[in-house]
Image: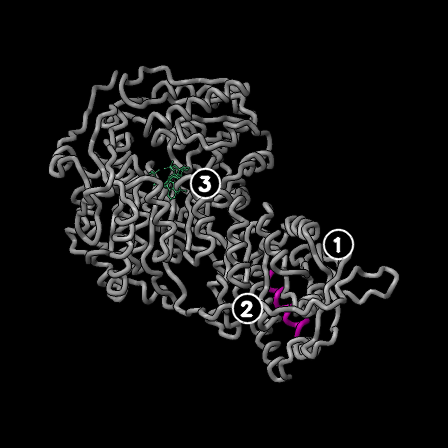
Amino acid sequence: MDYSPAPENPDLAIEWLKKHNSTFGLFINGKWFRPKSAPVFKTVNPANGKKLAMITEAGETEVNLAVNSAKLAFPKWNALSGHERARFLYAIARQIQKHSRLFAVLESMDNGKTIRETRDIDVPLVIRHFYHHAGWAQTLENEFPEHTAIGPVGQIIPWNFPLMLLSWKIAPALAAGNTVVLKPAEFTPLTALLFAEICSNTGIPPGVLNVLTGSGNTGSMLVKHPDLKKIAFTGSTEVGKIIREQTADSDKKLTLELGGKSPFIVFEDADLDSAIEGLVDAIWFNQGQVCCAGSRLLVQESVAEKFIERIKIRMIKLRVGDPLDKSMDMGALIAPIQKDRIQKLVDQAKKDGAEIWQWQGKLPQNGCFFPPTLLTNVSPASTVAQTEIFGPVLSSMTFRTPDEALMLANNSTYGLAASVWSENINQSLHLAPKIKVGVVWINCTNQFDASAGFGGYRESGYGREGGHEGMFEYLNLKKKMDVYVKRLKVKQASIYAKSDQNKLDRTAKLYIGGKQTRPDSGYSLPVLSSDGALAGEIGHGNRKDIRNAVESANKACKWHSLNPHARAQILYFIAENLEIRSKEFENRIVSLTGLNKKQAALEVKTSLSRIFTYAALADKHEGLIHQPPIRGLSLALNEPIGVIGIVCPDEVPLLGLLSLLLPALAMGNSVILVPSRPFALIATDLYQVLETSDVPSGVVNIVTGESHELGAILAKHDDVAGLWVVGTKEECTNAKKFSTGNMKIVWTCDGKAIDWFDSQQSEGREWMRRASQVKNVWIPYGE
Ligand code: NDP
């Protein structure tokens, strides 16, 4: 039996376009604004190449107008009660529900994706997002009592899920009390404009939501705008890196949802029929233009041949064609430029020795279509195994053992998602925490829900969208830090000299891999006491010392897998051993800083309490179990970031250092500490405390030297996953700038001082959150 055409009626969408004369201005301060001199560009239907409408390109004047209206609207919007904001979000959800068919059709026409997907996936998820976040707005004061909105935020989205990504950005921003300037992609502006119009039906105050259409240039102007307090970006890793560099010298909050090359792992004991259906969804959903597309098939060798044959049979049955035909599986690609890019990558695969198998059906004559494509005989290092193709092209590889599957899965610069297929749940749950990605789907794929945060590891970006964790991306701590840090100027005494190996060496060495080691340079630096006398010397660490420290920190992976109770026990042990030597530390503080005994005793006492806090939290910063609207659960696990570099403050050197080190350890990270240059002897006194407290070797590495030099080396190091810097504004900017290439997760004080005695600023869950990243593991149940 063959399918008959089942066309969706596009009249509603055509009528809406006509109502606007198929020409759109910008949505600023609650109304349409059509600047006379601004250039316009056309948006077309990729399925037939026909023009849909003319769109305005926002320039500097319009960007300023929109940002200004968001800025002016912010105080009032933020001052509304959670309940008042919740009512607006709820009304938006209702409006979208009411106009859901119009949204679905318009999205399909502007993007080329099938009506089946826009109607059954995109739009329902958008509605769910606004309902869910109406709930966060309602409960904000109780759920996030220590947090407050950030201000006006800039949001930039790509073309592959125009309406859905809009909702992922706007709903949490508004719920938290921020105002928004959103820039949709040049290819797909229409549903954002319809959304703006429909929102105004809810009576939402003018300026709370502004939509600026335009090119990458418009996006760039938003990124650089001084009045925006946050940039939330979804798009390519390439542009994500540019944005990170451009925002490095500002204190703008930044979340980046970037590209991916996600593995789809099939074990020999998987239900292969289900896995095939999962695979169709993983790689041919939305023509493969999905950031988390399962574009790398890893199949166990014993079933590979059988599985590949079944894929081919299944591929024959796929239906590719008019996106508005309700029975189509695949629609059109976004644009010819994307089609050419995909073709080039397939040609490259051929040159690299891959075998190509393509869907044999007839593609529509007009429009931008590409056949579902399977590449076999792909080598793991080849371009198509590493590059995000962003099209309906599956690269398949095989593995023999679970370890090999894991190695291949992690053999990517990206880390967005993974799908694991096996009837052995033990094996899947054993693997899930080891795959370096933000989402793992077990025996399912492409599951999304507003309650479960979505986002990546590594070059797939950072930050989460959705759920409890996503709300923090739109909130700041209420407590303000506003005094700028000044690094203590250290007198460069003439004692800066090469250590004499023949003399009795009193230089405190570096601490790497659980051993005290001489610095590679052979040089030491003086540490002076408060009266200017020489208190001792420290090693002058360099690039090679950092490299060794990173290597040993990376080897200390047992710490990550130790259970939280065991980690807590070791932290308590640190407190015990520090207490035994408290007088020694007090004397050191007095001699180096010039504080009086009482002040030094308070610092040591507070430090002990801080250790207790993190020993307590080690087994309490647990994840959540989400119950999304599927038959299954999503486990939001708080995972360590990995290896974190920490550049410590000069002020209150013992308490400052421990306040940073402890949350990182409690979450299971291993650490490279760069202690305060003038007070580094306090850190080197800690070696013995660490050694006697059963801290495994390599978990804490201490490299002394010049903070700005070592901070820059840590920022550039590809195997350091996170970096925290407390220092001057310049040191903080450099930490962000120098790590653009590897996209590590960076937190800095932005040059502002932290009161380390104030537990609200310097202790608790906020720090545990900084030391962790959320991974959502989806587990369906039922037969
Ligand atoms: P781009 O990075 O090219 O563009 C994304 C958005 O940024 C567009 O609105 C674009 O404008 C704008 N833009 C382009 N250059 C700049 C700039 N210099 N400064 C500020 N804004 C700029 O990505 P694509 O649109 O090609 O989208 C595909 C990418 O998005 C893929 O890599 C995909 O993986 C990723 N993505 C990630 C998701 C995630 O959640 N992690 C989800 C969906 C997609 P314009 O359209 O005018 O060029």
Estimate the x, y position of residue 435 in percent, counting from the top left: 53, 42
Ligand 1 within 8 angstroms of badge 2 C-beta? no
Q: How many marks?
A: 3
In the depicted structure, whether residue 405 falls above or below residue 573: above
Task: Read off the residue under disc 3.
Answer: 237
Q: Which numbered disc flags the more N-terminal residue, 1 or 3?
A: 3
Task: Read off the residue under disc 1.
Answer: 521
Q: What amino acid type is highlighted by mark number 1? A: Ser
Using the image, tell me which numbered label, if any, was put on residue 486: 2
Q: Secondary structure at mark 2?
A: loop
In the rendered structure, the answer to whether residue 100 lies left or right of residue 268 reads left
Q: Secondary structure at mark 3?
A: helix
In the rendered structure, the answer to whether residue 527 lies left or right of residue 115 reads right
Ligand 1 within 8 angstroms of badge 3 C-beta? yes
Give the main secondary structure of the magenta stretch. Answer: helix
Magenta residue span: 567-582
Using the image, tell me which numbered label, if any, was put on residue 2: none
Estimate the x, y position of residue 339 in percent, counting from the top left: 37, 25
Callout 2–callout 1 Cβ contact below 8 Å: no
Between residues 437 and 530, which one lies in front from this camera angle? 530
Rounded to the nearest angstrom, the CA distance separating label 1 from label 3 is 37 Å
